[in-house]
Amino acid sequence: MKKIIGLALCTLFAVDVVSAAKLPEDLSYTIYVKGSPAGKAEIKVSYEGDTITFESTTSVDYGAFKMNARCRTAADAKTGIMRSFRWDGEKNGQKYSGELAYDGKVAKGIVRVDDSVVEEAKSPPAHPVIAFEDYIVEHEILLAHVHAAAGETGLTGSLLLPSAFSFVSVGMRAASEQIIESNIKEAVCRKLLVEMQGGSPWAIYFDDQRGLPVYLAFPSVGTEIFLDEFFGDEPVSRYTE
């Protein structure tokens, strides 16, 4: 992969482009950790009325961390704000599953980890609200869509962490326009910086022609996520062991 070249200062997301374009029915992303392939996300996308639905299978296997999850996320197709999230799978030897629903005011749901069951209802500290589970790429897609639909350079809101059933604050801001190049394609992307309460910042490189992130970078943990359609079978990592 060629170097990523900065082009411009902070700009707004193109809301009309994002909200008007429908996503492909099938998506796949490859996950790298510290320069090595570590996982895969396969996603199916469908629309019904004003709702966009993602159904995905995600697997990650790196060092001591292992995860397999099957997920279904529904959101407002124009704003990206979550409506429901359902998942089941295993993480580090524990079975975990659950169902959450958000009506615009209150999040309700049930979370199961092995034999432990928690059923709760909580109100977010701030709006908008986005479901966010580690390595679930469709949640990154929705983060970018929420930011775009808001039409603001900077935006604050709440992430609903499903497996913990807790809210944390999140800030998003458009940082720059950059050219992202793979060995086979090129795209002008908008770099969105995301800062989550209690976590390290990461970057979403969003191509508003596709309505998708083509590349995600988590520098603090050396993790990258590559859109397969854009990077092909052999993406080149920026990180090493």
Image (cartoon, helix red, strand yellow):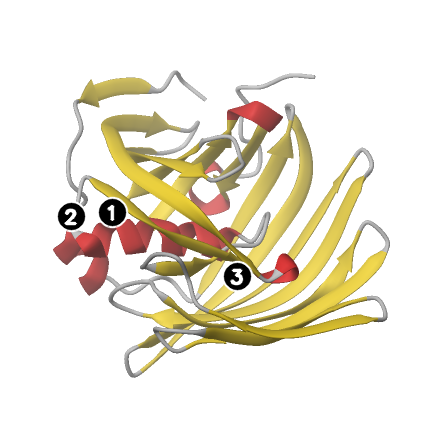
101 w.r.t. 161: above or below: below
Q: Which residue is mark 3?
A: 43
Dot 3 falls on a residue whose secondary structure is: strand
Q: Nearer the viewer, mark 3 or mark 2?
A: 2
> What percent of the width, then of the height, locates residue 201?
45, 31
Quadrant (top left, top right, bottom left, bottom right) of the C terminus: top right
Q: Nearer the viewer, mark 1 or mark 2?
A: 2
Q: Quadrant of residue 182?
A: top left
Q: Are marks 3 and 2 in contact (CB under 8 Å)?
A: no
Which residue lies at the image location 34% right of the left edge and 56% below the top edge? 126
> What percent of the width, then of the height, locates residue 29?
53, 47
Q: Which residue is mark 1?
A: 208
> Residues under labels 3 and 2: Cα distance?
24 Å
- For the residue marked with disc 2, what is the amino acid? Ala
Quadrant (top left, top right, bottom left, bottom right) of the N terminus: top left
Dot 1 falls on a residue whose secondary structure is: loop
> Residues under labels 1 and 2: Cα distance?
7 Å
| Mark 1 or mark 3: whose residue is earlier in sequence | 3
Q: State left or right for residue 12 relative to residue 50.
A: left
> Can residue 28 be spotted in the picture?
yes
Q: Which mark is residue 14?
A: 2
Q: State left or right for residue 35 relative to residue 90.
A: left
- For the residue marked with disc 1, what is the amino acid? Asp
> Can residue 57 be spotted in the picture?
no
Query: How many neighbours does mark 3 have within 10 angstroms: few (below 14), some (14-19), or many (20 or more)?
Result: many
Q: Are marks 1 and 3 in contact (CB under 8 Å)?
A: no
Q: Are marks 1 and 2 in contact (CB under 8 Å)?
A: yes
Query: How many neighbours does mark 1 have within 10 angstroms: few (below 14), some (14-19), or many (20 or more)?
Result: many
52 w.r.t. 163: above or below: below
Viewer-nearest residue: 224 or 37: 224
> Residues under labels 1 and 3: Cα distance?
19 Å
